[in-house]
């Protein structure tokens, strides 16, 4: 759940125009989008969001005489010129017509990296807290030991074993 919330915050900070610039090479690569799928996206942008693509523009981007990759590249450049809101509507159309492809976009996968950093930082901060609480200089650690002992319940099996063995080692040293 934390990963989902973090990625949603990252999405809000990144402009759709920038995302489309990052995703354009992925989307225009050969075989990524079928002609049928591109036509569905263009029709959705034209019919559901007529402010994004006019009828004349939709006809231009659906012209079967032009190669699919070229039409798609021109469509993406056209949306980038129109602005961030139109790029956002493209992403909505892509998600509703090809959710499997929307999930694989490079801009979406880069959104997950901050969650990994946050998780690693949290573990490091927790270990630093444990090291501080169990330093030999602390005279009365019984209250802290109880708190850390109960917090071990929330960790995985391997971390719990380390915490419990560390608590046992420190109690043996004092006796």
Image (cartoon, rainbow, N blue to C red):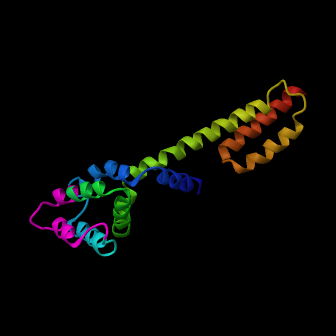
Q: Residue at x 74, y 46 (%)?
A: 152
Q: Looking at the rendering, in which quadrant would you find the N terminus?
A: bottom right
Q: 34 or 12, which is in the foreground?
A: 12
Q: Image check: 80 left or right of 56?
A: right
Residue 124 vs 45, above or below: the answer is above
Residue furthest to the left in view is 65
Towards the viewer: 168 or 145: 145
Q: Is residue 11 magenta?
A: no
The spot of residue 62 in percent (x, y) is 18, 68
**Residue 85 % position (x, y):** 38, 60
Q: As drawn, is 172 to the left or to the right of 131?
A: right
Residue closest to the eye, 54 or 20: 54
Residue 142 point in image, percent of width and height:
89, 37
Vertical relation: 139 (above or below) 121: above
Q: Residue furthest bottom?
A: 47
User: Which quadrant holds the C terminus?
Assistant: top right
> Start and end of the magenta stretch?
51-73
Residue shown at 28% from the left, 54% from the top: 81
| Number of numbered discs visible in the structure rendering | 0
Q: Is residue 52 magenta?
A: yes
Residue at horizontal 70 percent and vertical 38 percent from the top: 162
Quadrant in the rendering for residue 33:
bottom left
Asked if residue 12 lies left or right of residue 52, the reply is right
Q: Position of residue 168 (x, y in %)?
A: 81, 35
């Amino acid at each position: 759940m934390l990963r989902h919330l973090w990625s949603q915050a990252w999405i809000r900070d990144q402009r759709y125009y920038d995302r489309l610039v990052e995703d354009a090479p992925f989307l225009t690569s050969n075989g990524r989008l079928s002609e049928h799928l591109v036509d569905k996206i263009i029709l959705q942008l034209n019919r559901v969001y007529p402010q994004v693509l006019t009828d004349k523009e939709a006809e231009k981007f659906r012209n079967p005489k032009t190669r699919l990759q070229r039409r798609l590249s021109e469509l993406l450049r056209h949306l980038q010129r129109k602005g961030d809101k139109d790029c956002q509507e493209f992403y909505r159309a892509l998600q509703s017509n090809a959710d499997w492809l929307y999930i694989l976009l490079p801009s979406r996968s880069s959104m997950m990296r901050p969650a990994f950093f946050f998780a690693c930082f949290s573990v490091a901060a927790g270990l630093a807290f444990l090291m501080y609480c169990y330093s030999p200089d602390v005279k009365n650690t019984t209250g802290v030991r109880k708190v850390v002992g109960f917090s071990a319940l929330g960790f995985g099996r391997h971390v719990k074993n380390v915490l419990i063995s560390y608590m046992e080692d420190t109690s043996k040293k004092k006796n």
